[in-house]
Amino acid sequence: MTVKPKITELLKRQNDGVIEKEQVIALSLLSSVAGESIFLLGAPGVAKSLVARRLKYAYKDGSSFEYLMNRFSTP
């Protein structure tokens, strides 16, 4: 199996049960494969955490950390 079908299947699984987040999920996967960071900004309830949590399952033994930021967070 070549790389393209594997990525297509991975994106299909990542998008399972998620509505209107296909582009965000695909770009998140692309940035992680490229070794770059991603910053998800948006109102509460728009699936930012869901996208980030699902991304770690794209990798064997994937791990992540979470940091809740608000207006009182120190840089």
Image (tube, helix red, strand yellow):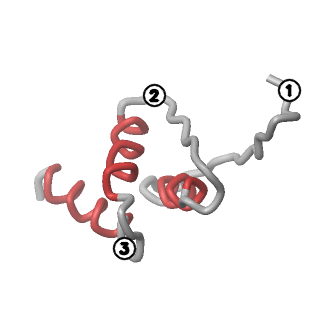
The residue drawn where x is 62% and y is 51% is: 43
**Image quadrant assignment for residue 71:** top right
Between the C-alphas of marks 2 and 3, the distance is 24 Å
**Left or right placement of residue 23 versus residue 36 in this view:** left
Determine which residue is flagged by label 1.
74
Q: Which mark is residue 22?
A: none
Instruction: Identify the amino acid type marked 3.
Output: Asp
In the depicted structure, whether residue 60 falls above or below residue 35: below
Q: Residue furthest bottom?
A: 17
Q: Mark 1: which secondary structure? A: loop
Q: Quadrant of the N terminus?
A: bottom left
Between the C-alphas of marks 3 and 1, the distance is 35 Å
User: Which residue occupies the foreground of this view, 53 or 71?
Assistant: 71
Q: Position of residue 11 (x, y in %)?
A: 30, 60
The residue drawn where x is 63% and y is 48% is: 64
**Image quadrant assignment for residue 75:** top right
Say if mark 2 contacts mark 1, CB within 8 Å.
Answer: no
Instruction: Identify the amino acid type marked 1.
Output: Thr
Determine which residue is flagged by label 2.
36
Instruction: Identify the amino acid type marked 2.
Output: Glu
Q: Which mark is nearer the camera, 3 or 1?
A: 1
Q: Which mark is residue 16?
A: 3
In the depicted structure, whether residue 49 falls above or below residue 18: above
Q: Earlier in the sequence, mark 2 or mark 3?
A: 3
Between the C-alphas of marks 2 and 1, the distance is 23 Å
